[in-house]
Image (tube, grey):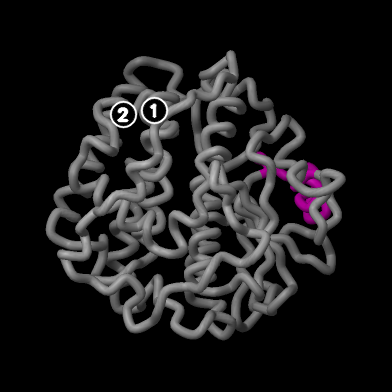
């Protein structure tokens, strides 16, 4: 999720086009881009409000990379200077020593095109941005960082299933992950209606797919489930009202609501979600859509912890592995979240 150059007031007032990641270096086991996998060298910068960053937060936790890859959580309400570290003492990230994520971008390249986006990985020794390639980052965590995975880490991108996973993720990205933004930031009626129709057409197809199977691909959790979850968990809280994706609520779709609850109650998913951050970001940053910046009280979140019965479909969430342990100290989401 990027901080656009025109500032927060541009949201909802200008045509929406998602920026491509400008910094696409990869951190790999062999270090072929100059960035070898190494414990403690890099810092993952995220916002718990951002669905793209939340993919990385979930993957990092499922794979047990917390000790190897430290994490900085930005304030959910960024200003026109970029994501800021006002949640930390003195308003500085305690590891990188910077007030704004843009400082790490500037150390990498001055006058770069596009906005300052999360997730971002920063090289701690130099303070320079390494990558903001949100599409590739989590795949590399699953496949290039294996030497640092915890015992029992799941295979989130199994080689034998990659073609199917890629195809599912492409549909989810185009119509759902990005579709809600195209609907929410539309500046014309036809543009909005086409995007909104695409969102719900794809959700209905996904519901049909998930009616008789627990997970999107195979019988275990994969990257595809992570990418769908980060949109579903925000759906009723922000996309239904704020982005006008309101043909129906997630809670009104029996299959998707049960699927989303199943994931939410799986260690590594719901324990990374902060609804407070999510609602504050969308309603207070997108002033072109919500000029009053009023954050709604609802929806009621109690239903996320109700029985889902999806285990009756079988499936093995972590495959031959096991669930991650407790959330590390200092990374817990407050109960109010």
| Residue 23 makes an appearance in the image | no
Determine which quarter of the picture holds residue 107.
bottom right
The image position of residue 98, as x and y in percent, is 84, 50
Judging depth in this view, the residue of 247 and 86 nearest the camera is 86
> Compared with residue 182, is residue 35 higher up or lower down, i.e. above or below?
below
Q: Secondary structure at mark 1?
A: helix
The image position of residue 276, as x and y in percent, is 55, 38
Judging depth in this view, the residue of 27 and 209 nearest the camera is 209
Q: Secondary structure at mark 2?
A: helix
User: Which residue is tagged 1?
Assistant: 183
**Crowd tier of the residue under label 2, counting other residues whose Cα lies within 10 Å: few below 14, some 14–19, many 20 or above:** many
The image position of residue 308, as x and y in percent, is 24, 54
Which quadrant: the C terminus? top right
The numbered dot on residue 144 is none
The numbered dot on residue 196 is 2
Q: In the rendered picture of this protein, how many numbered marks are placed on residues? A: 2
The image position of residue 156, as x and y in percent, is 40, 71
Determine which quarter of the picture holds residue 84.
top right
Task: Give the spatial CA distance, label 2 vs label 1.
Answer: 5 Å
Judging depth in this view, the residue of 214 and 13 nearest the camera is 214
> Compared with residue 102, is residue 326 higher up or lower down, i.e. above or below?
below
Label whose residue precedes the other's in the sequence (2 or 1): 1
Determine which quarter of the picture holds residue 264.
bottom left
Look at the numbered discs 2 and 1 and tell me whether their residues touch, using CB distance below 8 Å: yes
Residue at horizontal 44 percent and vertical 54 percent from the top: 270
- Is 64 displayed left or right of 173 in the figure? right
> Compared with residue 26, is residue 198 higher up or lower down, i.e. above or below?
above
- Is 329 displayed left or right of 179 in the figure? right
Query: What's drawn in magenta, residue-wise?
Result: 100-116
Residue at horizontal 68 percent and vertical 46 percent from the top: 74
| Residue 249 makes an appearance in the image | yes
């Amino acid at each position: 999720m990027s901080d656009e150059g025109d500032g927060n007031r541009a949201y909802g007032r200008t045509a929406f086009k998602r920026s491509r990641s400008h910094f696409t270096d990869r951190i790999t086991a062999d270090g072929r881009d100059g960035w070898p996998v190494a414990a403690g060298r890099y810092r993952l910068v995220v916002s718990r409000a951002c669905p793209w960053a939340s993919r990385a937060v979930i993957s990092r936790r499922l794979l047990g990379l917390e000790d190897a890859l430290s994490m900085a959580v930005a304030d959910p309400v960024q200003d026109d200077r970029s994501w800021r570290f006002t949640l930390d003492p003195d308003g500085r990230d305690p590891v990188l020593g910077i007030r704004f994520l843009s400082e790490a971008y500037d150390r990498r390249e001055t006058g770069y095109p596009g906005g300052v986006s999360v997730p971002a990985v920063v090289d701690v020794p130099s303070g320079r941005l390494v990558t903001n390639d949100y599409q590739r980052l989590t795949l590399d965590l699953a496949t290039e960082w294996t030497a640092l995975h915890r015992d029992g880490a799941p295979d989130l991108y199994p080689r034998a299933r990659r073609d199917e996973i890629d195809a599912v993720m492409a549909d989810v990205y185009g119509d759902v992950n990005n579709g809600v933004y195209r609907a929410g930031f539309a500046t014309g009626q036809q543009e909005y209606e086409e995007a909104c129709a695409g969102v719900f057409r794809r959700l209905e197809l996904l519901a049909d797919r998930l009616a008789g199977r627990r997970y999107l691909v195979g019988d275990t959790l994969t990257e595809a489930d992570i990418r769908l979850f980060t949109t579903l968990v925000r759906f009723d809280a922000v996309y239904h009202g704020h982005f006008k994706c309101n043909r129906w609520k997630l809670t009104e779709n029996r299959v998707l609501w049960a699927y989303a609850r199943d994931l939410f109650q799986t260690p590594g998913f719901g324990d990374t979600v902060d609804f407070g951050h999510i609602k504050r970001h969308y309603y207070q940053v997108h002033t072109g859509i919500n000029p009053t910046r009023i954050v709604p009280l609802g929806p009621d979140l109690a239903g996320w912890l109700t029985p889902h019965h999806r285990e009756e479909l079988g499936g093995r969430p972590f495959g031959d592995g096991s669930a991650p342990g407790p959330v590390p100290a200092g990374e817990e989401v407050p109960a109010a979240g």
